């Protein structure tokens, strides 16, 4: 099974996700009730299988009503053999977007922001002219603004077949404004509001600037006070230094074979991704957050309904994307959440429509797949083991032969994209 990414003859650019691959089941059976309870032995075997397939370390928490299971498998440091632990603090990448969206929707509820107002009303110097009048706040949050992603321009060597700029800028402190300018000045990916949308991290940096404009405080400070603390999260934060606060794993990036052995990117300045993906958290905190969100404890019913209005968004596959939230229809029903990925760390957090069943999982090795001569990402045994564990944790059943025979449709767990050339 291969997934087509993109290709050119001699200077092939890959639009690639920043973590392991996930799954949306194609030709899935009609939704049925998820198995009640947690098969702890099966979950342990499934988690171990991901490690045995080649993932260095994985940690996860699964909830079913009042029941909770959490475990880890593998190593946090391949040099020392230090084991991973279930409660490790982890860079969660684009899951940050859900937090940022909640913060913006709180301002919508206050009347300080209108979802369908042009961003130029609030930030005329950030998105100037006609584009600022055509792009709305909603378009930023659901990725239909068609503002280009700033990441390839912040690390330009990734488009030239080299990771040099990634290493050169590892500890550089970027400002949101300069990164937004990179995205706004680049060629748009389409007309404002057009669907399918194109996933762009720049959208959520603009959302951070919007928060600062209407609240008068730093975006990270506002999100910390009004989202993280309101949800009762104790291990979730925007790091103030290049280091991950608290017990953590190293983060290993393979970059589709560029790095052999994989390089450790656990320490770097997170300013390049800011309110689009700079947060750290634990699997327990992520489950608590999405449970609180979907129960209406962080925003009102009207705002939550807006979050759940989805459009198709291209991000390696097609996502049913709302406002910082997307859904996957699995064999046992609909699950809401988000994926996240940064260099070396990937995360998945999904919650059933009724809030009963939850899965959060983090891994410490990314882009371990290979790429063939036609620019296709060739799936790795880690991917199939991850699919099995994902479905076991969410639906209480393995993917098994039936799903594999049906050729499931893959999308990145982390929908962040970077462009690299081979």
Image (cartoon, rainbow, N blue to C red):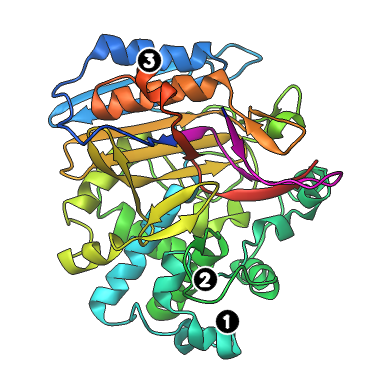
Q: Earlier in the sequence, mark 3 or mark 1?
A: 3
Q: Secondary structure at mark 2?
A: helix
Q: In x, y percent, where is residue 326?
A: 36, 52
Is residue 14 inside the magenta stretch?
Answer: yes
Residue annotated with mark 1? 127
Q: Number of numbered discs present?
A: 3
Q: Looking at this view, is 242 or 201 the one in front?
A: 201
Residue density around tag 1, few if under 14, some if 14–19, many if 20 or more, within 10 Å = many
Which of the labelled discs sits on residue 206, or is there none?
2
Residue at (12% x, 29% y) in the render: 66
Specify the quadrant of the image occupied by residue 324: bottom left
Give the magenta range: 2-22
Q: Earlier in the sequence, mark 3 or mark 2?
A: 3
Q: Looking at this view, is 362 or 82 the one in front?
A: 362
Residue at (48% x, 63% y) in the render: 196
Q: Looking at this view, is 66 or 285 the one in front?
A: 66
Residue at (20% x, 36% y) in the render: 31
Q: In x, y percent, where is residue 216?
A: 42, 78
Q: Secondary structure at mark 1?
A: loop
Which of the labelled discs sits on residue 90, or is there none?
none
Q: Nearer the viewer, mark 3 or mark 1?
A: 3
Residue annotated with mark 3? 46
Taking the image as shown, residue 331 lies to the left or right of residue 407, namely left
**Badges 1 and 2: C-beta atoms under 8 Å apart?**
yes
Q: Secondary structure at mark 3?
A: helix
Q: Is residue 253 above or below residue 121?
A: above
**Badges 3 and 1: C-beta atoms under 8 Å apart?**
no
Q: In x, y percent, where is residue 399?
A: 36, 22
């Amino acid at each position: 099974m291969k997934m087509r990414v993109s290709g050119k003859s001699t200077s092939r650019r890959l639009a690639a996700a920043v973590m392991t691959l996930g799954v949306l089941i194609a030709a899935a059976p009609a939704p049925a009730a998820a198995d009640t309870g947690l098969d702890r032995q099966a979950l342990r075997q499934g988690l171990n299988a991901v490690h045995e397939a080649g993932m260095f370390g994985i940690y996860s928490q699964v909830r079913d009503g009042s029941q909770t299971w959490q475990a880890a498998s593998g190593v946090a440091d391949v040099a020392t053999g230090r084991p991973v632990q279930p409660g490790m603090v982890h860079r969660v990448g684009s899951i940050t977007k859900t937090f940022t969206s909640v913060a913006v929707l709180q301002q919508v509820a206050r009347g300080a922001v209108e979802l369908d107002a042009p961003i130029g009303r609030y930030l005329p110097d950030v998105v100037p002219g006609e584009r600022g009048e055509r792009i709305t706040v909603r378009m930023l949050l659901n990725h239909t603004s068609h503002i280009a992603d700033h990441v390839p321009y912040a690390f330009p060597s990734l488009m030239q077949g080299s990771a040099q700029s990634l290493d050169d800028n590892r500890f550089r402190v970027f400002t949101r404004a300069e990164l937004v300018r990179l995205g706004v000045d680049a060629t748009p990916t389409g007309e404002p509001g057009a669907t399918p949308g194109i996933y762009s991290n720049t959208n959520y940096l603009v959302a951070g600037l919007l928060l600062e404009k209407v609240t008068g405080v730093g975006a990270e400070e506002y999100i910390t006070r009004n989202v993280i603390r309101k949800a009762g999260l104790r291990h979730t934060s925007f790091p103030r230094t290049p280091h991950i606060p608290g017990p953590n794993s190293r983060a290993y990036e393979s970059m589709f074979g560029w790095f052999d052995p994989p390089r450790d990117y656990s320490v770097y300045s997170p300013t390049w991704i800011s309110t689009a993906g700079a947060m750290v958290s634990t699997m327990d905190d992520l489950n608590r957050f999405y449970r609180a969100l979907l129960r209406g404890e962080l925003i009102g019913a009207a705002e939550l309904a807006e979050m759940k209005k989805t459009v198709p968004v291209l991000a390696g596959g097609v996502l049913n994307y709302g406002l910082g939230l997307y859904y996957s229809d699995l064999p046992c029903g609909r699950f809401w959440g988000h994926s996240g990925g940064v260099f070396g760390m990937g995360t998945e957090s999904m919650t059933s429509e009724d809030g009963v069943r939850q899965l959060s999982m983090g891994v410490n090795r990314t882009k371990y797949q290979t790429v063939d001569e036609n620019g296709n990402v060739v799936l790795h045994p880690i991917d199939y083991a991850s699919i099995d564990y994902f479905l076991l944790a969410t639906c209480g059943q393995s993917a098994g032969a039936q799903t594999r025979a049906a050729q499931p449709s893959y999308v990145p767990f982390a929908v962040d994209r970077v462009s690299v050339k081979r």
